[in-house]
Amino acid sequence: MTDSEHTGRPMLFLTEGGPTYRIEKRLGMIHERGPRLVRRSMFAICLTWVTLLVLCLFQGTAYGDRVAIPFLRDFAAYTRFLLALPLLVVAVNVLGPHIAHASAHFVRSGLVVEEDFKRFDQAVEKGLRWRDSVIAEIILVLLAYCGAFSALKGMAVEVSTWYADRTGTGFSLTMAGWWFAFFCVPLFQFLMLRWLWRLFLWGQFLWRMSKLHLQLIPTHPDEAGGLGFVGEAHRFFSVIIFAFSIASTGVVANEVVYGKVPLPHFAPLIGTYVVLVVILFLLPLAVFAPLLLRTKRRGLYEYGSLATEYTSSFQKKWIETRPPREEALLGTGDIQSLADLGNSFAFIDKMGPMPMDKRTPITMVAACLIPMVPLLLTMMPLKDVLKLVFKLVM
């Protein structure tokens, strides 16, 4: 039984809709029984990397010394189209179900009261309507081409490469370069932008949930009032961050290897990238900050009063009473209740402003940096890199 069947409420399937999704479905790339991720990934690779390879073989720039950077020695081509692009496709099956199940869990867990069911349904339906928006995807396509054209216009080609020939007045695109600039790059940027759009839709849904009368429990053991499942599902956006970082690593590798730019030169840029990306992907969780802070403050007052009353009675009964006691101290439930009360108060005290534990930001930072570890090979031997990674992991 699915979550939707169990709760009777719609689920937020962010990855199963939209104009491009419907086109893929008509082409047989997506089947009712499954997304056919391997077929879609291979199709994307064939349209990009394989096609570029064929064009470069035809024009003689796939390998050899005819150009300074032949296609088979271009790190960015590998990371973008053989690694990051398929990962953006596969992420549909990784992230989509977790987001959908998390959306349904708001009702299944009892956080959403019956009087808010209609508003919950409206929040899901609005998210799905925006997901299916033709205008939204047209804007994403236009933004992808604008980004590709801006990159092409600002491109400084110092030497001839597989995609551009250096001329006296600038550069001219090769046959492979035209396919690269007008199809491959826009396709890759469109997929990245579509994931950012889905992140925005998820954030919009969470914002609408934060406006409901959620039944948050200050003493919930997830230390998030019962919203810990949101951060658990949100952590899977690290797959998207990982894909972004893989693509970026290839560009940096080209600059280090062929542009002779020392890797430490990129340290401030990499640091800024990590900070901005993590902040961007954690923003949707911040919508619960006011609600969680109010819940924590309320819990501290309520359980603080309860703790004062209970510990005062405990003090009078077990500490201040001098006559022989009828009740034996050993085995009494009063001490266990005192410990349980302390644990409950500790859960409240540990509540943060966002529904996540420390693993979520750590996972996202790791997704940013792990793809860049191979760049260290330009500065130190492999064994030293492995030692460094081992120390960081341990």
Image (spheres, rainbow, N blue to C red):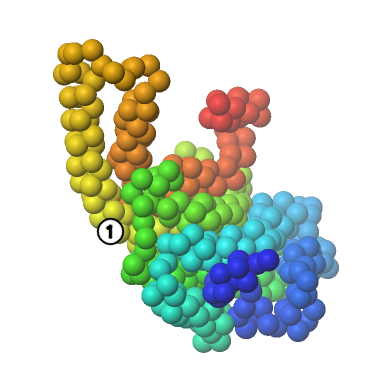
Coordinates of residue 5 in the picture (x, y in percent): 63, 71
Q: Which quadrant: the N terminus?
A: bottom right
- Is residue 34 visible to the viewer in this orientation of the structure? yes
Q: Position of residue 349 (x, y in %)?
A: 30, 40
Write the residue at 40% across / 68% down: 113
**Whole-percent x, y for residue 224 in the image:** 39, 50
Q: Nearer the viewer, residue 247 or 20?
A: 20
Q: Is 253 above or below relative to 44?
A: above
Q: Nearer the viewer, residue 34 or 264?
A: 34
In the rendered structure, which amino acid carries the disc numbered 1? Answer: Pro
Quadrant location of residue 388?
A: top right
Please rate how many residues cluster around mark 1, counting C-alpha atoms within 10 Å: few if below 14, some from 14 to 19, many from 20.
Answer: few
Which quadrant holds residue 206?
bottom left
Q: Residue at x 76, y 84 (%)?
A: 26
Answer whether residue 68 is visible to the viewer in this image: no
Query: At x 36% / y 56%, what residue is drawn?
Result: 216
Mark 1 highlights which residue?
290
Camera-side residue: 254 or 371? 371
Residue ID at (57%, 42%): 370
